[in-house]
Amino acid sequence: MYKCATILAAGEGKRMKSETPKVLHKVCGKEMVNHVIDIMRKAEMEEVNVIVGRGAEKVKAATEIKNVSYSLQDKQLGTGHAVMCASDFLKGKKGIVAIFTGDAPLIKEETVKNLLKFHEEGSFKATILTSVIENPGAYGRVIRNENNEVEKIVEAKDCNSEEAAVKEINAGMYCFDIESLLLSLSKLTNNNAQGEYYLTDVIGILKSEGAKVGAMVTEFEETIGVNSRVELAAVEKILRQRINKKHMENGVTIIDPDTTYIGSDVEIGQDTIIYPGNVIEGKTVIKENCMLYPNSRITDSTIESGVHIQSSVILESHIGENTTVGPYAYIRPESTIGKNARIGDFVEIKKSSIGDNTKVSHLTYIGDAEVGSACNFGCGTVVVNYDGKKKHKTIIGDNVFIGCNTNLVSPVKVNDNAYTAAGSTITEEVPEGALAIARERQTNIEGWVEKKGLKK
Ligand code: UD1
Ligand code: CA
């Protein structure tokens, strides 16, 4: 059967107190709405539609790569009204629409799949996902009849005292037969405590018309919606624990899962060991047998196997096998570091490639450079890549030895097997196998201290 999803993402999100639309706040490095979109895709929805309103342009921009369609809800007149705004997307379709909210990112793929299965096998016109909790608070209550069938959903603000005491809540996640949903939406009114068109009223309408309505109970944790920054942090913590657990089950050692922050799309190979204080973000891939000593931030990078990293920042870069990085290295976007290389303490690499076996051990800046293999950079080397107006390129061959405190004024080339003398400012090409010395010769003035009367 045809299956599609519609995600509610048009709401105000007032309690977030933010310029950013609520659904774009991130949980484990990914926007909440993108978590929900990804889960819908994994649950094999053929099409995903996002209902946007508040901050529509921003929401569209942030979800652009996900290949979804959009419906616009100009004014936020309630969840039922939001789905009415998606009627262009739904019209003429036969099958199931799953309706989820963009502010509840903890829902699991398997639960979505189970909900669809439950809905199909029960031949329901509507199926709601519910949960049972001690303090149902602001959630809509699921009211069942004497046969234990779902009768309707009553919003917290519209409950009488008996309804308010019901502990089964509406998760705000549903499956509908598309045609039945569209028919019922046209019958909604806003005659309630909030003057809104409630999607939840569709359940009562369908039931009163004799349609079969189902409910599937799940763990409360999965249904938590984020309405405030406090809830955002609570959801982040739960997702972080799930992510860390998944990696540990895959054979990664995480010494302290409470202080290890791994984004939801990160991949990590077996027998990698992660010390506390690491933040691993975006599309990062870390291969097998790596050691991540404390306190690094690694974003959108690939780290090959056997790499050791300590207290460093690595952004959008590639680190080759068995290389060591840090402590206190800064590897900036579009850098490629070879195998068995060493990027040591207080080294900054910007948009450069560094060959295999090359050592840049300390206190060095390399920007816009192509460096060959088996080179050695002395302490305090600076690639002078910027002339105040433009950035220029530096090319260093293989087996080059750069003496301590060398300036490489770009554009400049140092050919294979060449050396530069310590303290040199290199402005011209250094031929293969040459030693370049570019500094004042030393002069010793004999007896100078005594002559000046400074001898002690
Ligand atoms: C809703 C349900 C409630 C359920 C709860 C679960 C209704 C009427 N109530 O209440 O039964 O227990 O979710 O979390 O549906 N939105 C729009 N346009 C609007 C209004 C809301 O797109 O006009 C979106 C919001 O961005 C949000 C979602 O719909 O993603 C839920 O809206 P929210 O106002 O948070 O509904 P609740 O009051 O939490
Ligand atoms: Ca909500």
Image (cartoon, rainbow, N blue to C red):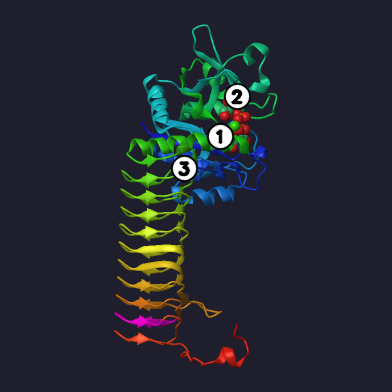
Residue 91 showing in the rendered view: no
Task: Name the residue tied to disc 1.
Answer: 234
* Residue appearing at x 67%, y 39% in the figure: 14
Q: Quadrant of residue 93?
A: top left
Q: Which residues are magenta?
A: 410-421
Tell me the crowding category of disc 2: few under 14, some 14 to 19, or many 20 or more residues within 10 angstroms, Cα based: many
Tell me the crowding category of disc 1: few under 14, some 14 to 19, or many 20 or more residues within 10 angstroms, Cα based: some
| Residue 257: percent from left, percent from top | 45, 38
Distance Cα–Cα, label 3 vs label 2: 32 Å
Task: Name the residue tied to disc 2.
Answer: 139
Q: Quadrant of the N terminus?
A: top left
Q: Circle 2 — which element?
A: loop
- Residue 422, label in figure: none
Q: Is residue 178 above or below residue 404?
A: above
* Residue appearing at x 41%, y 32% in the figure: 94
Q: Is residue 267 left or right of residue 204?
A: left
- Number of the front mark, 3 or 2: 3
State whether label 2 is within 8 Å of ligand 1.
yes
* Residue appearing at x 64%, y 39% in the figure: 13
Q: Residue furthest front?
A: 456
Q: Earlier in the sequence, mark 1 or mark 2?
A: 2
Task: Residue type at mark 3: give it.
Answer: Thr
- Number of the front mark, 1 or 3: 3
- Residue 260, label in figure: 3
